[in-house]
Amino acid sequence: MEDIAAAAGTSKSVFYRYFGDKAGLQQAVGEVVLSQMQRKIGEAAQAAQAPREGLLAMISAYLQMAETSPNVYSFVTRHAPVDADSPGGSAISGALGHFFDSIAEMIAAPLRTHWGDGRETVIGYWPTAAIGLVRNAGEQWLSTPGSASKPDQEAMAQQITAWLCVGIAPELSETPVRTNEGN
């Protein structure tokens, strides 16, 4: 808090008065940043003409916002130490949870329209799994030092989209998926 107050040109007491503690500040910043990200991702999805195009646009928007302000992204998305008696620790998880639930629904809506044929179970799981892949791959990409082999934001978004739509090894797609039906 001391470093943040110094960078803002004020005292720590001002931050403590308005935010209570670091978790309160993290929650307040998180709400603003997550709202901005949600708006940008939503706009990207709405501008798309096809589900894959929308997915690529959403991933691009997410990576672009994270890359633009990696320190803010890290501050907002990292988990605050959870204190059972502190509402701030669970509030940030709640804000992130709400953000990712909203993004999952943005992904699921066009899938329901495209596949309105009873695949609701798959549509229920896939957006959450996709978010996990995007978030983890994106955070690893952000933390990778710049080099000639590091993909730029556009290439990374295209790669993640391909993983989600086709998989890492399309030639293995002939293996049947087992279900509990008939067992």
Image (spheres, rainbow, N blue to C red):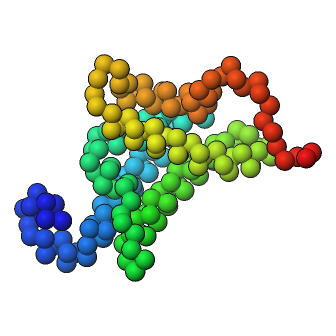
Quadrant assignment, res 83: bottom left
Specify whether 30 is left or right of 13: right
The residue at the point 42 percent across, 24 percent down is 155
Q: How many marks?
A: 0
Please state, as top left, top right, bottom left or bottom right, where the N terminus lies in the image.
bottom left
Which of 141 and 7 lies nearest the eye of the viewer? 141
Specify whether 102 is left or right of 139: right
| Residue 52 seen in render | no
Which of 173 and 108 lies nearest the eye of the viewer? 173
The residue at the point 72 percent across, 45 percent down is 122
The residue at the point 78 percent across, 36 percent down is 177
Q: Position of residue 58 (x, y in %)?
A: 48, 39
Q: Position of residue 170 (x, y in %)?
A: 66, 22
For residue 141, above or below residue 149:
below
For residue 4, above or below residue 160:
below
| Residue 160 seen in render | yes
Q: Residue furthest right?
A: 182
For residue 63, above or below residue 174:
below
Q: Position of residue 92 (x, y in %)?
A: 40, 65
Q: Position of residue 13 (x, y in %)?
A: 13, 75
Which of 6 and 175 lies nearest the eye of the viewer? 175
Quadrant assignment, res 88: bottom left
The residue at the point 14 percent across, 73 percent down is 14
